[in-house]
Amino acid sequence: MKKLIAIAASVAALALVGPAAAQSPIIIKFSHVVAPNTPKGQGAEKFKELAEKYTNGKVKVEVYPNSQLYKDKEEVEALQLGAVQMLAPSLAKFGPLGVKEFEVFDLPYILPDKAALARITKGPIGKGLLAKLEPKGIIGLAYWDNGFKIMTANRPLIHVADFQGLKMRIQSSKVLEAQFRALGAIPQVLAFSEVYQAMQTGVVDGNENTPSNVYTQKMNEVQKHMTISNHGYIGYAVIVNKKFWDGLPADVRTQLEKAMADATEFSNSISQKENDDAIAAMKKAGTTTFHDQTPEEKAEWMKALEPVTQDMASRVGKDLIAAFKKEASAKSN
Ligand code: LMR
């Protein structure tokens, strides 16, 4: 009798396992615009690896790099519609979504170093900004680092006057628009995937970006001069469709949160080296002349760009800028 009960129990268990095992995995489509061998590209791959591992295959992450699925503006719309579940747009691309406060990160020279970045993104300012996404149907999961920007063009960019009349590609940020206007250049919003060709055909003369982005898009083939100015910053917010995230089984969501925390640590740990390596590789390729700024040249740029922060205060938020600056200049313990 005992044996019979045991058999009946295992048959019942099998019947339960059957359909559960046959259940298809939860799919997360993670779309982004940069190359796989960038800090963000590698962060996305690390998240895929860990998410699939921690959930025991209950979740499958499909990473679509290089604007394969969607370009900058389209990908945010796709996320809201639920056509993709996860993105990591740069912090300069949240204005069109209606959360223009993220553009505080675009203000020239606002971030002195990566320690300040960590204090801001991990503290109340970073958390407060992510919380602003929720009413848009989006949850902000993490900040991923890329790095400080260099300037590129086909003429040397030494003095502010060198920018006069240059058509410079920008991301869709009003702060970046104001920045290039302050330098006397003509800013032009373009999707990241279109930049190389726009440079090749002369639609734009130059751009600002991180060395990793410049190198992995082969911009050094079509830009003769680069100035290592570190005048601004590019980083990302990893975001997910709220309806999708809230609808996940609680245990799966916890495992994915852990995968995201670990992938974040990984991505942030490689970003500086990726950018340093990109500069070294471009120097080796020899198609571009690099210029390191003297302190006097840097001071000249800073002076020209100083009014941008004041001019953008009504857009980004005066109090936010003040709090950001205070935290940025605080000493790390
Ligand atoms: C750009 O558009 O230049 C960058 O935001 C691309 C990226 O995602 O790093």
Image (cartoon, grey):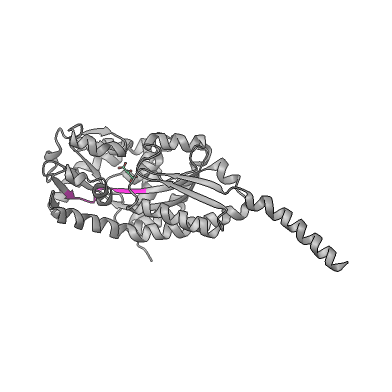
Residue 159 image position (x, y, % from top left): 12, 44
**328 to 131, vertically: above or below:** below
Q: Foreground: 130 or 289?
A: 289
Residue 110 belongs to the span the image colors magenta: no
What's drawn in magenta, residue-wise? 227-235
* Ligand 1 image position (quadrant): top left
Question: Residue shown at 34%/38% (left/top)?
Answer: 313
**201 to 30, vertically: above or below:** above
Quarter where residue 118 is shown:
bottom left
Q: Foreground: 135 or 236?
A: 236
Compared across the picture, whether 24 is left or right of 133 comes to: right
Q: Foreground: 166 or 107?
A: 166
Question: Residue shown at 35%/50% (left/top)?
Answer: 36
Residue 181 image position (x, y, % from top left): 22, 34
Residue 234 belongs to the span the image colors magenta: yes
Residue 203 image position (x, y, % from top left): 20, 31
Compared across the picture, whether 118 is left or right of 61 comes to: left
Residue 119 seen in this snapshot = yes
Q: Residue furthest bottom?
A: 2
Quarter where residue 252 is shown:
bottom right
Residue 168 seen in this snapshot = no
Residue 164 image position (x, y, % from top left): 14, 35
